[in-house]
Image (cartoon, rainbow, N blue to C red):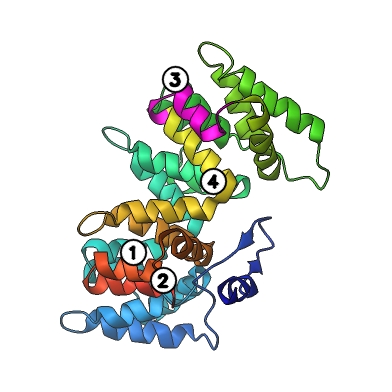
Amino acid sequence: MALVSEFLGQLSLNAASSEPRFPTVVPTVDFDPDKDAARLETAIKTKGVDEQTIIDVLTKRTYHQRREIAFAYEKRTKKDLIAALKGALSGSLEAVILGLMKSTSQFDASEIRGSIKGLGTDEETLIEILCSRSNDELVEIKDVYKELFKKDLAKDVAGDTSGNFAKLLLALVETKRAEPSPMVDYEKIDSDARALYDAGVKIKGTDVNTWISIMSERSVPHLQKVFDRYKKYSPYGMEESIVKEVNGDLQKSFLVLVQCFENKQLYFAKKLNEAMKGKGAKEKVLTRIIVSRCEVDLKKIAFEYKREFGQSLQKTITEHTKGDYQKAVLSLCGPE
């Protein structure tokens, strides 16, 4: 129980979002941007580059603190910190450090843009981000996307996907999800559960539109109760029904949605485990999750990881990565 109480003790609420936060990267006390900027300047100038100092400084500061360091650096050197880091670093370490120089929503928006720009679509990234982010997060991602790329996220998603898969993603991008209500509406829980069953398992074929509207418009606590109630009507649970009824990217998207409604941090823990299955690691996936969640809920993801796989996330990362990349990722995860 010590683990649970210590973990809950770390719970911090963010005013901008209704979801509790479990960050591993928190503001540094006695923060001195000028001192940090000077340390970075020396580290970047050093022959062979002092990666360790860059990691120590930037992985232990929040995004807002890193921005202050970037201002101080520019004032001090008349150079842009991001450009200097790009020149000094390479490979996976560069990807992590440059990712940290973006806010969480800028990072998410850039990852989405990267997944749909150019030839072919990286559906995995698109599904992971759009189906796992809260309504508040998606609202911010849409704004930032427009700001950064002068493009409309919905239009870009529509131009790059098709069919029911596109319909589902666009419904999520519309951010029509209801806010959680203190009142539990048992009638609506029952009618939604019934509608999901009537639109799928009960009939030949699937009325996907009904599934999409319920899963993109209802609040998360409501849906958790709906999926529980669903078992009264259907011989299969919601996930099993999705696998039986739809396939391809649409199936993957519905599954990510349902897993995130049930336990979002467990979803990410499983995704991290999958990324470190073989020899080495899928560093792109590892970087994306660690960087995008370190100021959101990475502490709870690590907690769920240990509970699910019997080994700490940190130990798994140590076994599957190496060098400065490993140091940076472990530093973002914080101590076990």
Mark 1 in CB contact with mark 3 (< 8 angstroms): no
Q: Which residue is mark 4?
A: 260
Residue 81 in the image: state x and y as whole percent. Answer: 35, 71
Q: Secondary structure at mark 4?
A: helix
Work out whether residue 156 or residue 238 is closer to the camera in this orientation and state it.
238
According to the image, label 3 marks what residue? 163
In the displayed structure image, the side of residue 4 where residue 283 appears, left or right: left
In terms of sequence position, does the residue under pointer 1 or pointer 4 come before the other?
1
Q: Which span is picked out in magenta? A: 235-249
Please tell me whether residue 48 belongs to the stretch shown in magenta.
Answer: no
Q: Earlier in the sequence, mark 3 or mark 4?
A: 3
From mark 3 to mark 2, how far is it between C-alphas?
39 Å
Q: Position of residue 247 (x, y in %)?
A: 41, 25
Residue 186 is situated, as x and y percent measured from the top left of the image, at: 80, 35
Secondary structure, mark 2, is: helix
- The disc, 3 or 2, on the residue closer to the chain's N-terminal end is 3
Mark 3 neighbour class, 10 Å CA radius: few under 14, some 14 to 19, many 20 or more: few
Amino acid residing under circle 2: Leu
